[in-house]
Amino acid sequence: MRLRLQILNKINDIPINTKFILISIFCVIIPILSVNLIFLNSLSNTVREREEENFKISYERAKTDIAHVIREGLAVSHSIYYDRGIYDELDKSYEKGEYYSVFTDSLKGRVDRYLAIYRNISNITIYTSNDTIDSGGYFIILNDEIKDTPWYKKNKEFNGNPMLYADIETIDYSKNRYDEFLSIIRVMDQIDRAQADRPQTMQHERILKVDINTHWIYNALEREKDYLSLYIVDDEGRVVLAVDDYVYGNEEKYEFIKFDDLGFNESEILFDGNLWEASYIKDWRLVGVPNEEKVYMAMKQARHFILLLACVSILISGFLVWIILRSYNDRIKKLSSHMSKFGDEQLDLIVLNEGKDEIGQLIRKFNKMAVKINTLINDVYKLQIQKKDLELERVQAEINFLQSQMNPHFLFNTLNAMLIVSVKNNYTEIIDVIKNLSKTLRRLLSWKDDLVTVEEEICFTEMYLKIEKFRFSEKFKYNVFIDEGVHNFKIPKMSIQPLVENACKHGIQSIKGHGDITVEIRVLGEDLKVSVKDNGIGILEDQIEDILMSLEDDIYKAGSIGIRNVYRRLKLYYGEDLKFFIESKKGKGTTVSFLIPFTSKLSNQKSI
């Protein structure tokens, strides 16, 4: 009994929030996480087994399709190999001009029919040592250059049996273009073997080469690349077909590389088997490297599912625990909080559903006590104090507003005083500058509309140019040209002046000679072209590219903030219809121009 009381006393000393946290951790979170971890392990094994089965299906499917393509090539090879008519025509000796008619009447048709039927065959070539034929088309004279090719030499090792051979031919080094060839090659000696005991009037060497269209094999490899990276490896260990371009060497030399040079570990290779059991291809292999990203994504989805399930379980269980326990916690916290406010004369009532238990009775008694105490406080006196505080705040707000209004007026009054003094003393040049500066400042403060007419924008720009004219004196002059009919066309404000300011600051200011700035507004077809041209120091070509790139990026380039602000403003209104140009030559000057639709709906708007 004493131990029990000690335990209860220890528990009573723990804050209610801590008790809730302990209950949630040991009664909700830990059991749910334990169950879900066990489930995650089981689900992960299931997902891996499923993906491995998908890998196997993908490998067998690709292997079947590739073997089918090769079988078609072999079928064509057999058909031509046993075509006695081809033997008879190729063994004849032709006079000049006789072969052409035989080719068109007989030989050409014997080959064309296979190309028309079998889409997996790209080309058929028969090489013969009969030098009386005309080399071309499907029939080529076997010369020393052909006999020196690798495929011819290797075919000799097969003793007349069919051979599958891969080769690569570069088409254009400059454009990294090349073609792979997969061919079935065999010596056409069927007639020679059948009539080996009979004397022949003429014997010629004949070699049949059937080129397989690798496009269909590539389709099979490409189709499976989400599951496997497949590599067709020939009997020399070379990767002859794959969807990865890097297996064909580098930019300087295109050639097949060894599969062992790709650097795969044995653990990475899931499948490595014979491509086909036929004798002439038995040493060819189809190697499959699984796409671990696929497994990773499947495992990731499984983990996300388990995590979601755990979160939902924890949320639901925690919500139920919270609903049950908040009945005590919220009411006690409310009561404790309101009682602590008594010292600060905050006698607020506890507004909630008290309930019918002991805590509810205590809350009801507290509310009755608070009501009686509130009747003893002079609420009228407090309300008067609050009204005075509100009045002081209102007056302070008005003072701040008037003060914010006073600063611009003070500036204008100062400029007017300077103007009067300049008039009295006949400072004619300063008079114009002060007038233009005053107009410029007043225009900036009073310009509320986002859209202004071309005439207003040019008027504002000319005020700025007059100030710059005073600044540069005889070193500077400007011209403004505007087409008729565009003065009332509306454009976004501050679309021209920042470009002029940029030209003065970065172009004219840095030259020693006379500075010229020309502003032109022309109508070009359905567009309005605005250009600002100076004869300043100019911009390097690579700097122009950097500035144009920075217009779209959130990167500010030194000296291009004014151009960037104009571009962003125009882009906001005209979108893809805006065309923006910067043309410059070092030491020759710079022209910044833009094209906007002259028929834009913005011209009918007052502001945006």
Image (tube, rainbow, N blue to C red):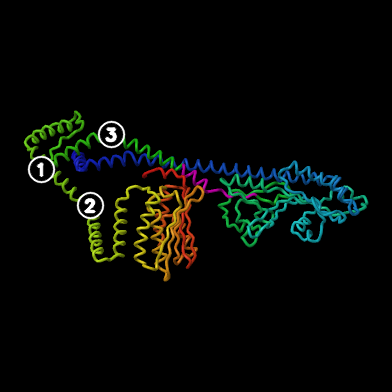
* Dot 1 amino acid type: Ile
Q: Name the residue under label 3.
A: 323
Q: What span is colored magenta in the figure?
A: 286-301
Per the rendering, the mark at residue 405 is 2
Amino acid carrying mark 3 in the image:
Ile
Q: Which amino acid does label 2 sit on?
A: Gln
Say if the magenta span includes residue 339: no
Nearer to us in this view, 263 or 201? 201
Task: Classify the position of the C terminus by image quarter.
Answer: top left
Mark 2 or 1 closer to N-term? 1
Q: Mark 1 points at which residue?
A: 385
Mark 1 neighbour density, 10 Å: few (under 14) some (14–19) many (20 or more)? few
Q: Is mark 3 on a helix, strand or loop?
A: helix
Q: Earlier in the sequence, mark 1 or mark 3?
A: 3
Examine the image and state in which quarter residue 340 appears. Answer: top left
In the displayed structure image, the side of residue 332 where residue 129 appears, left or right: right
